[in-house]
Amino acid sequence: MPASAHMGTGLPGGIASGFRHPFTGWDHLLAMVSVGIWGAFLGRPLIYALPVIFPLMMVAGAALGMFAVPIPSPELGVAASVLVLGLCIALAVRAPTWVACTIVAAFAVFHGYAHGVELPSAADPVGYSVGFVVATGTLHVCGIGIGLLNERPHGVIVTRSMGAVVAAAGVLFMFQAVGA
Amino acid sequence: MTVVVAAVAAAWVRLPVGWTDAVFLGCWSSTALNSARVHLVRSSGRKATVLLCVNTGIWAGAVISVAGRKADLLVALPCMVTLLPASWAVRRGGSIAVKVVSSWLLAVAILAATLQFLPVTPGYLPDHMD
């Protein structure tokens, strides 16, 4: 079974369609929000560096997808991103800056690839890209907002619990990707 | 002002229709360059900024010349008022927000520029679902 944000071909184009797409699949949505939560947890400079790196590397992945450059199991990579990012939040992993950037960049390539192969051509691909990138950024900002709960009493428990739920969803996506 | 003058001047130059793809590629590349510069340069010199503005205006005007109408300038140029909230955010210590948004713009510009090289979008071919 494919990761759920990537269903079907010949997507309708336009900003609204691109904006809606990341919200239609739990795998992409959870990964985006997790990037924001983890960034907020790690603090400066990663609180803003991760949401900057992700869309840029996602574009690199999308370019690979559009040119049909083969990469190993993108669906597995997307599922792994949900699992790993969830674990990083749940275990409160304080990764060094370069490690966090590398992890997020690598997973962004898989997310970009999965959507790059589906980018519509005739129906306003630029509008679709704008909508998609803005939606991705919005999910990052939502994640940062959730991550700021860490500054409140018991907030860390809430965010780490959320991380555990995301990681559990990641395990499910992994099983689905392996079984596909 | 420099962008406006350059864009208006370029929009009045008649360009061959065959240049359409190249002009769009140049316009998106120019957008990517401007967005990247927000990240790469802390304070740009006046000469470099003016050159960048001229470059941006020329490409924006060229796009209107090959694929639009002169009246489109009236729609395109008001987009420059985004300068106001951006400079307000920078003055208030919100330069991070400007950098994040410019990274989104950079991502879109690179993607759109890449599309110029793509004869057929794989979205209409069988994908990993099929």
Image (cartoon, rainbow, N blue to C red):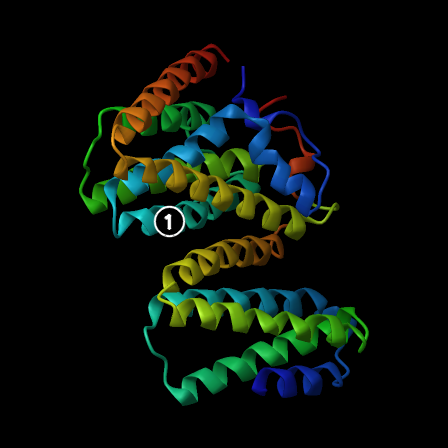
**Secondary structure under badge 1?**
helix
Residue nearer the viewer, B8 or A37? A37
**Residue B24, position in %: x, y?**
65, 66
The C terminus of chain B appears in which quarter of the rendering? top right
Outermost residue on the front side: it is A153
**Residue A13, position in %: x, y?**
71, 43
Location of residue B19 (image quadrant)? bottom right
Task: Find disc 1 in the rendering and name its residue.
Answer: A53
Q: In this view, does B57 lie above or below B113?
A: below
Residue nearer the viewer, A58 or A165? A165
Q: In this view, does B95 lie above or below B43?
A: above
Say which residue appears at 47% left-offset and 35% top-offset: A111
Three-letter amino acid code at the position of disc 1: Ile
The N terminus of chain B appears in which quarter of the rendering? bottom right
Location of residue B91 (image quadrant)? bottom left
Subunit bearing disc 1 = A
Location of residue A96 (image quadrant)? top left
Q: In this view, does B73 lie above or below A145?
A: below
Horizontal relation, residue B72 to residue A16: left or right: right
Q: Residues within 10 Å of mark 1 (few under 14, many from 20)?
A: many
Say which residue appears at 33% left-offset and 24% top-offset: A163
Residue nearer the viewer, B27 or A73? B27
Q: Is residue A154 visible?
A: yes
Say which residue appears at 55% left-offset and 26% top-offset: A25
Q: In this view, does A154 lie above or below B91?
A: above
Say which residue appears at 60% left-offset and 69% top-offset: B27
* Callout count: 1
Q: Is residue A106 visible?
A: no
**Residue A42, position in %: x, y?**
24, 41
**Residue A51, position in %: x, y?**
39, 47
